[in-house]
Amino acid sequence: MVTWQSTSENTVALRGELSQRSVETLLPVAPRLRVYDSELNIELSQLAKVDSAGLAFLIELQEYATQHDIALTFSGLTPALEKLVSLYNAQDLLIN
């Protein structure tokens, strides 16, 4: 299970496991990002697990944000997530 929780006006924390099973609860991405006018930070340090579906979800968030002029940043990448990002060569997309 994963939760999407606003912690401040422009920050959201993801908690739990961002996996193939849980990503479905966060889709579609548009309603989640429409409420942010120009910037959003997503805090990832409380994620216990991220698999390739979870990484694909984060990339989809980034793509949507780019298309809608939302400055999206990710913070708190865990070592395991950094390794997954590196494995998929997605550093340019997620590491700010």
Image: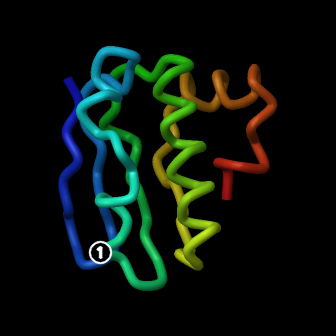
Residue occupying image coordinates x 29% and y 39% = 26
Mark 1, other Cα within 10 Å: few <14 / some 14–19 / many ≥20: few
Rendered image coloring scheme: rainbow
Residue type, mark 1 in image: Val
Q: Classify residue 72 as left or right of residue 95.
A: left
**Which of the 4 quarters of the picture holds residue 28?**
top left
Q: Which residue is mark 1?
A: 35
Residue occupying image coordinates x 55% and y 45% = 60
- Residue 84: % across, % down: 64, 22
| Local secondary structure at mark 1 | loop
- Report the quarter where the N terminus lies: top left
Residue 23, above or below 27: above
Residue occupying image coordinates x 35% and y 71% = 34
Residue 71, above or below 5: below
- Report the quarter where the C terminus lies: bottom right
Residue 49, above or below 47: above
